[in-house]
Image (cartoon, grey):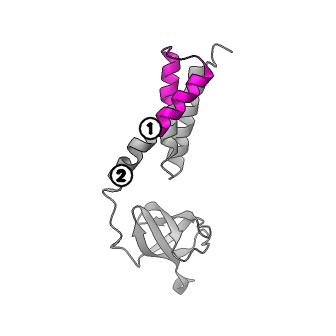
Amino acid sequence: MSAYLTPAIIWLSLGVLLLIIEVATSGFWMGFFGAGALITSLAVWIGVTEGIDTQIAIFLVTSILLLLALRGPLTRWLNRGAPSTTFGDTGQAAVVVQEIPAGGMGRVSYQGSTWDAESDRGQAIPRDTRVRIVRQKGIRLYVRADHASS
């Protein structure tokens, strides 16, 4: 193996990649595996392990422990400032900036910010469609196409 492509560098690269994926998505899962890869990189770098079996075990154990121990508390902490399900802006207009697929999640622009959004009826809503906010759950808006302005 080259001096530049060591197991520690591979695990570090994987950890950074998974953290970037976490930031780019809204699943709140990949960050824990990214942290597990970073911990594995550190373990390899300080010489705790060299074998791939031990490295994979460290990665899996630390990732799963972090996920189980921290996902719930961090989710609650991140949602603490989010408005309740009685969203004061129900009925307000927003614009779809990332297509909302049928039964899936897209993004809408509302008051200068983008929000995760789903169709309240499970229908696809194309980009640039004007929608109305029907309700909110955590940081996700449920919207309906605004046929009055179409």
In the picture, residue 104 is in which quadrant? bottom right
Of 149 and 54, the residue lying toward us: 54
In the picture provided, is 47 more to the left or to the right than 69? right
Residue shown at 55% from the left, 63% from the top: 105
Query: Which span is picked out in magenta?
Result: 38-64
The residue beneath circle 2 is 78
Q: Can residue 9 be seen in this view?
A: no
Of 24 and 45, the residue lying toward us: 45
In the picture provided, is 38 more to the left or to the right than 136? right
Q: Residue 22 carries which label?
A: none
Q: Residue 65 carries which label?
A: 1
- Amino acid beneath label 2: Leu
What whole-number distance in Å separates the C-alpha atoms at marks 1 and 2? 20 Å
Q: What element carries label 2?
A: helix
Q: Position of residue 142 (x, y in %)?
A: 47, 71
Q: Where is residue 35 in the image (x, y as percent from the top left)?
A: 47, 34
Q: Where is residue 138 in the image (x, y as percent from the top left)?
A: 39, 62
Q: Where is residue 58 in the image (x, y as percent from the top left)?
A: 51, 28
- Amino acid beneath label 1: Leu
- Considering only order in the chain, which callout, 2 or 1, is on the residue closer to the N terminus? 1
Quarter of the image with the N terminus in it: top right
